[in-house]
Amino acid sequence: MRKCILIFLFIVIAVSLPLTFKHYREQNSLTLQQKLEDFNYTFDILEQNYPYFWVIQRKFGIDYLGRREEFEKRILLTKNDAEFYEELSRMIRLLQNPHTFLISPEAYDFMKEYYSNLKGIGSGLWKQITKDEKISESYREWKKKLNNRSHILPFVFKYVEGKYVKVDGASSDYIPQVPDGSYLTKIESVDVDEYVKSLAEVSWLEYDERRRKIRLKDPVFPALYKKEYILEFVTPEGNPLEVKVKPVAVDPGKLLRPSSVRMFETSILKEGTVAYIKFNSFNTTDPEADRDEILKFFQSIRDYPFLIIDVRGNTGGNSDYWKYNIIPPLTDRYLSATFYKVFRGGEYMRKFLSGLPGLKNISELPENLVLPPEISRHFTYFIELGCHISEVDSIGFKGEIYILVDEEVFSTAETFVAFAKATKWATIVGTRTGGDGMGSEKPAIILPNSRLVIMFQNGMALNPDGSANAEFGTEPDIFAELTYEDYLKYLKWQKTNPESKGVVNPYDTVINKVLEIINQKLAG
């Protein structure tokens, strides 16, 4: 696959390609009783502590707690350890939260390296887990039991105005030619939107609020090993196209390696007037590494009246990156915002919450918040999440700041956007974000028999109005969305301008919306 397939961030990749589409090595060590013990141990902890059961029911129609008996029967039908792993992975994926997943052997190896090098936050619990020799030995054994080859349909898609637009593909030696810009309409004669609904146990999904439908969050579709698929497209010219394809194998271990994509890119959109910086990710073990280069750019545009910060596609990473590298140099005032995070407070979570400063009873939440209905019945505690950034390191930038966002903005990147909006530090432009920000170190479930590890989201962060951030994300101040028409123009421009690498897309609908606003201000 070409390079763009490799641009996944760890939090998404770790289990993005599930064992459902792998073939197994017949190695068994767990008895049926041990499998049931691990399953019940996991489900009991989640049932009493997991915060998003009601969110996924509203977004995706998933009655998770009502399916316990079904999950148990599926565990009983597993014939070997690999099948048990698959069912457990499917069960956890159905929770539809990328902060909640069964850690694969490849992801465990990556985490050992990541947390050993991590500077700053997030190194406590997970550093201990990755240093635990019993868990490490267990994962070495699981690596022997599982074949780490997963399979996907051989195309990369970008979701544009409700369409899955084909933008890349595998080698043309054995894959039928599908013009870039064609959009997928059917898979195996099933409407693509209906097909996506069937992937809740094996792919990350999101809700397209504007079109009121469930969409695939990942840029690739999972596929069954050795199965041939019939795909139906509509080409950029409006012609129907049907192709037969075979899945391609990918190695999750390789996908977990850091990509060669730079953390940030800069450009001048209008000399002396509009500067632009795009942060592709905050996913770094050393947030200080880019500081000097970022500061140098900010210094060079200090007197510009407008700055565009683009975090579209940024799924998060290390919060120290934006807390030290982005806002402090650019703010000319003290910034402060307070969010809330609520917790179920089951027995398992109490040991994680016991030392949490500022823990309060849920009844003490401010009365002006419009809360999700489950808060009063199923949640016990909350904390205030205060974020404060001083202007003492300011370079003296006085211009207006626009932050570009989309539905892929998630986790730490979400926190950055939510903070910027809450403090009115910048104007947010784009589509509603992916949410699940304002996080903290996630607890882990270590299964007693298999010694597998499950990371799960420990609480629900609330937006300033009281809504669940994971459910609604952050709403932009100005709505703007990439159009299919503009995206086709961009793809054509990209092919006819091979020197365009690093050049900002002239057909970017969202950037052009901001430039239109800026031009009106300059003219007025």
Image: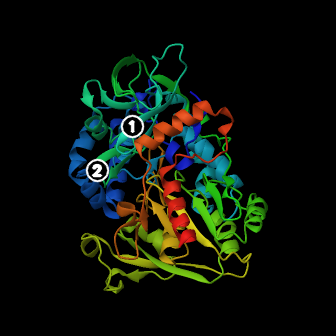
Q: Give the answer, above or below, for where 373 lies relative to 118.
A: below
Q: Nearer the viewer, residue 30 or 251?
A: 251
Residue 413 placed where, x, y %? 54, 60
Residue placed under numbered mark 2 in the picture: 211
Above or below — where is 420 with respect to 106?
A: below
Q: Residues within 10 Å of mark 2 (few under 14, many from 20)?
A: few
Check the image and report above or below for 96 versus 76: below
Dot 1 amino acid type: Tyr
Question: Label 2 sits on what residue type?
Answer: Arg
Horizontally, residue 34 falls left or right of residue 15, namely: left
Q: Is residue 322 left or right of residue 75?
A: right
Is 97 displayed left or right of 363 in the figure? Answer: right
Locate residue 28, reporting x and y percent: 44, 29
Classify residue 89 by image quadrant. top left
Q: In this view of the protein, can residue 16 be seen by the observer?
A: no
Q: Residue at x 31, y 86 (%)?
A: 367
In the rendered image, residue 191, in percent from the top left (x then y), is placed at 26, 32
Mark 2 residue element = loop
Q: Is residue 22 above or below residue 403?
A: above
Q: Identify the residue position indicated by label 1 in the image.
A: 164
| Percent of width and height locating residue 91 | 34, 44
Disc 1, SS: strand
